[in-house]
Image: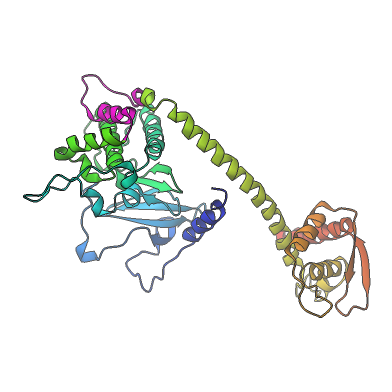
Amino acid sequence: VHLFLPQELINRHLITMAQIDHSENPDVPSEVDSYHSLFPLEPLPPPNRMQKTSNFSYITSCYKAVNSKDDLPYCLRRIHALVFSYDFHAGAETMFSRHFNDPAADSYFTKRKWGQHEPPPPRQHAGLLPESLIWAYIVQLSSALRTIHTAGLACRVMDPSKILITGKTRLRVNCVGVFDVLTFDNSQTNHLALMPQYQQADLVSLGKVVLALACNSLAGIQRENLQKAMELVSINYSSDLKNLILYLLTEQSRLRSVNDIMPMIGARFYTQLDASQMRNDVIEEDLAKEVQNGRLFRLLAKLGTINERPEFQKDPTWSETGDRYLLKLFRDHLFHQVTEAGMPWIDLSHIVSCLNKLDAGVPEKISLVSRDEKSVLVVTYSDLKRCFDSTFQELQAAASGSL
């Protein structure tokens, strides 16, 4: 985790910044209400061949877009009549594309031809998912349902094509609320009357997702394959996982609750909690580094607004005189040093060290040499910090019109 987190964050940033060429994609609107910079998150079918999705029975499309009000990216799910806005998670993929995109995985459940023998059930080491991964998913999905059900609502989209995976195992449920809007009936006086029924359906849907994961195949949840699927689970996984699946898929005379499966999860919950805490420690450690990077970047950004400014207050020599001249020599001390042979001397640790000393305003002395090497100025970092702060404040005052 520690090695790949920075690269993962960089990749997410690049995805967040992605744009399309509108001249090559004229069907993608440039703006929708307060959203702009739309970028398709799913392949766009030709307009004359668009088909209704199996989930919502409507034509749908999905885009990344930036909200002009807060300048943050969002995921827009368009039900070709309505647009739903969700949090955008760069680099996310669906559970379907991660785990159920291999047709060969269904081979155990496909009907054998006449005269062929029943294929042996696959074992966990031969392509089935590790049980620890399945439990990690169960903890997150059941937690999501618990939150939704506690609020008196239902998920209604517990499906591998609507479950998003970011990183290695982090799950999020997508498209929540779409069915509530599409099936809204204004003639009903009590819109929450069917919620218990929908919540029971959520538990069945969770059971199907878990069974599909255990079989590593969506064919396993088809009614004609359930017996073979449960036999496969019995052979390869613990009785707790089998019992959990059976409990979720079996009709009960009483209303069931997602809390009922907690005893089956048992101590595995602590395993997921420990993993979450460890990841949190790694993220905090990386965040501490980025805080330092951000601080140094702000120093460089401020220095960049001062150095080589062509004119200020109608004075074309402003950046070359007074305190500004010291800051110009300090900039050369940071970036433009050369070796005795006249070759560029580049040392990032030198740059970071000097910027840290400037930010702290330490009393250490530093020799600043002019470009013609005819003059040497000896100052302290505290002197430079005073020059730096007062000069930038002068620029800020002029920018705000208070100077």
Q: What segment is highlighted magenta in the picture?
A: 237-261
Which secondary structure is most common in the magenta stretch? helix
The answer to which image quadrant residue 396 occupies is bottom right
Residue 89 lies, in percent from the top left, at 45, 50
Which residue appears at 36% of the width and 64% of the height? 29
Which residue is situated farthest in the top direction here?
254
Which residue is situated farthest in the left direction here?
114
Vertical order, 293 against 240 (above or below): below
* Residue 115 belongs to the span the image colors magenta: no
Q: How is the image coloured?
A: rainbow
Residue 139 lies, in percent from the top left, at 40, 33
Q: Is residue 398 visible?
A: no
The answer to which image quadrant residue 260 occupies is top left
Vertical order, 296 against 86 (above or below): below
- Horizontal side of residue 360 vs 259, given as left or right: right
Vertical order, 262 against 112 (above or below): above
- Horizontal side of residue 104 vs 90, given as left or right: left
Residue 182 lies, in percent from the top left, at 26, 43
Nearest the viewer among 207 and 82 is 207
* Residue 249 belongs to the span the image colors magenta: yes
Which residue appears at 20% of the width and 63% of the height? 49
